[in-house]
Image (cartoon, rainbow, N blue to C red):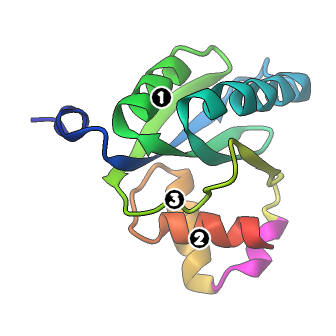
Amino acid sequence: MERNTLILKISPMLSELIYVSRRSTTCTDADVAQILEASVHQNSKKDITGVLLYSKSQFIQVLEGEAAAIITLYDHIKKDPRHHQILLVSLNLIEERYFPSWQMGSKNVGENYEFLTCLSNQEQIVFKQLLKGQESSKAIKIIHKIFQD
């Protein structure tokens, strides 16, 4: 049984989904602003929280909420032409949200990853693996740390 199906059957448990994707070359900064604006508006209605890290070439997003709601949103995101090569990094049940008051926080991380200076060498390795779609139990803590700086 696939992980998505299993979590849907035990919904409405609080869950967290992390994915990475390549940003379409036609996706402008105005498009990203529109994504964020729509996210804040729509996510509050569905009790979804999370954050979006983005650069000129990539997105990393954390979605938190009821399993069915975040899986439905993820399925919608997969159809968005502003993304391609979308990889589900993790889908887990959680006890509490890392981003409880953020309908959709965002941070432009740039291509040179200057923000990595806030991370230890080991955390930088894990983050770079995350960019490649590799799952790590430490991923959410690292993303949370990036948003604390």
For image coordinates 79% across by 22% down, the residue present is 27
Foreground residue among 115 and 33: 33
Residue at point 36%, 38% (across, down): 67
Q: In this view of the protein, which residue sits in the foreground, 142 or 72?
A: 72
Q: Residues within 10 Å of mark 3 (few under 14, many from 20)?
A: some
In front: label 2 or label 3? 3
Q: Quadrant of the N terminus?
A: top left
Q: Residue at image x 31%, y 46%?
A: 13
Give me the disc on residue 142: 2
Under mark 1, the amino acid is Tyr
Q: Which residue is mark 3?
A: 97
Residue type at numbered disc 2: Ile
The correct choice, above or below, for 110 with respect to 83 in the image is below
- What percent of the width, then of the height, locates residue 18? 48, 47
Label disc, if present, on residue 138 of the rendered structure:
none
Magenta stretch: includes residue 118: yes
Q: Is residue 23 among the parts visible in the rendering?
A: yes
Secondary structure at numbered mark 1: helix
Answer left or right for 143 relative to 17.
right
Magenta span main SS: helix
Residue 90 at least partly seen: no
- x, y (%) of residue 77? 55, 23
Using the numbered discs, state the Cα–Cα distance from disc 2 to disc 3 in whole angstroms.
14 Å
Ranked by sequence position, the earlier of labels 1 and 2 is: 1
Q: Residue furthest right?
A: 30
7 sits left or right of 51 in the view? left
Q: Tell me where the magenta segment starts and ends, as one range.
A: 114-120
Where is residue 88? Give x, y as percent: 41, 40
User: Spatial distance from mark 1 to mark 3, Cα to Cα?
Assistant: 18 Å
Taking 64 as reference, is 30 above or below it? above
